[in-house]
Amino acid sequence: MVEPNFDHLCRMTDDRGTFEHARYGEPRRGLGYCTDDMARVLVVAARESLPAPRVRDLARTSLRFLIAAQDLEGRYRNRLNRRGRWEDAPALEDCWGRSIWGLGTAVSHSDDAWLREVAAQELERALPQRSPYLRAVAFAALGAAELLSVEPHHRGAHALLTDAADGMAPPCANAAWPWPEARLRYANAVLPEAMIAAGAALGRPMLLQHGLDLLAWLLDHETVDSHLSVTPAGGAGPGDIRPAFDQQPIEVAALADACARAASVDGDRRWVDGLGAAEAWFLGDNDGQHVMWDPGSGGGFDGLTPGGPNLNQGTESTLALLSTLQHARRPVLASK
């Protein structure tokens, strides 16, 4: 079993945050940082069991970044340049949803009392907001469910998760394409994962089952010849030619996240098998039979192209690798 290696992520990080892009194994400092990444850093660092001091530092650095990114109304800026200046206005896009996900994960998983307390305070401003964007809502729902797992009577988290659940697409009559969008896009598995999380937390068995069914369809759709062949960067629709490129590690990590959650509430062995397929994708069981990470640095490669891996080791890809390896290290299968 491959253990998560935080060397590269630490090398990509300075006192302000984690640089978004890399040229091979070196951070491209001039391209700055983004809140999307820092929220995911917090997710991965906070849920690491028995974290080393440097992983604790990563969690604290990411939390300080999210504090700076949030405005007084609970919205988030996403892009910070190398000089420490924000380049965009506060919004309710994915960075808002991912920040709630990161903060909720910190409250529910971190063994750092300061981190839990401050993350809980930051959530109070973010939770009352609502986003019109499907994936932003799904990420936020995950964070709200994490908070409810340790504070089951938290009103703000319950309200956000209820609103998210009420807005989730019902089952589609089209068995050939049951997906709630005309095309698969990015981080696709977060949609059924949010349904599973909301259904379990709110006691809505029909929503929970819909999420499990949709995840099963996605897992089958993105499996070819017994390995993952995930949605490419440009998305995919009915009848598109497979395999397709460029395949992004975030797709694989989203499947791993969703399968790990499904396994915690449902005893079907397919979820552990799906998690194993996600780990195997990084280790070379993919459409190109290419290893998708650097064992020396611990960095994840930025994408699978028709000619092989994109050897740049950006933060998103490295976090996707680390997240998947975390789940693979401790899969949970619920009893029937």
Image (tube, rainbow, N blue to C red):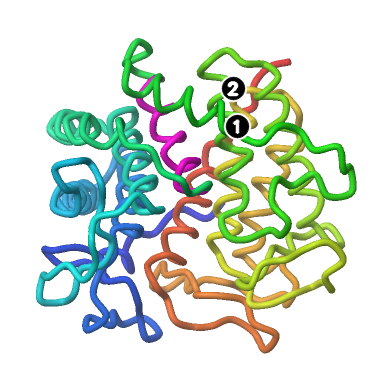
Judge by depth and name the residue closer to the eye, 53 or 70. 70
- Whether 221 is drawn above or below 193: the answer is below
- The residue that label 2 is drawn on is 199
The answer to whether the residue labelled 1 contacts the one labelled 2, judged by CB atoms less than 8 Å apart, is: yes
Residue 128, image x, y percentages: 30, 30
Judge by depth and name the residue closer to the eye, 215 or 234. 234
Q: How many marks?
A: 2
Q: Residue furthest front?
A: 132
Callout 2 crowding tier (Cα within 10 Å): few <14, some 14–19, many ≥20: many
- Whether 294 is drawn above or below 91: the answer is below
Residue 32, image x, y percentages: 23, 75
The structure residue drawn at horizontal position 56% and vertical position 75%, both measured from the top left corner, is 303
Badge 1 amino acid? Met
Q: Which residues, given as a range, are shown in magenta?
A: 135-148
The secondary structure making up most of the magenta span is helix
Measure the C-alpha gap from mark 1 to mark 2: 6 Å
- Whether 151 is drawn above or below 256: the answer is above
The structure residue drawn at horizontal position 33% and vertical position 33%, both measured from the top left corner, is 104
Residue 129, image x, y percentages: 32, 36
Along the horizontal axis of the image, is 37 left or right of 288? left
The structure residue drawn at horizontal position 81% and vertical position 49%, both measured from the top left corner, is 220
Residue 283, image x, y percentages: 62, 65
The structure residue drawn at horizontal position 36% and vertical position 45%, both measured from the top left corner, is 43
- The residue that label 1 is drawn on is 195
Asked whether 173 falls inside the magenta stretch, the response is: no
Q: Residue furthest bottom?
A: 307
Could you say whether the residue bearing mark 1 is in a helix, strand or loop? helix
Badge 2 amino acid? Gly
Along the horizontal axis of the image, is 232 left or right of 98? right
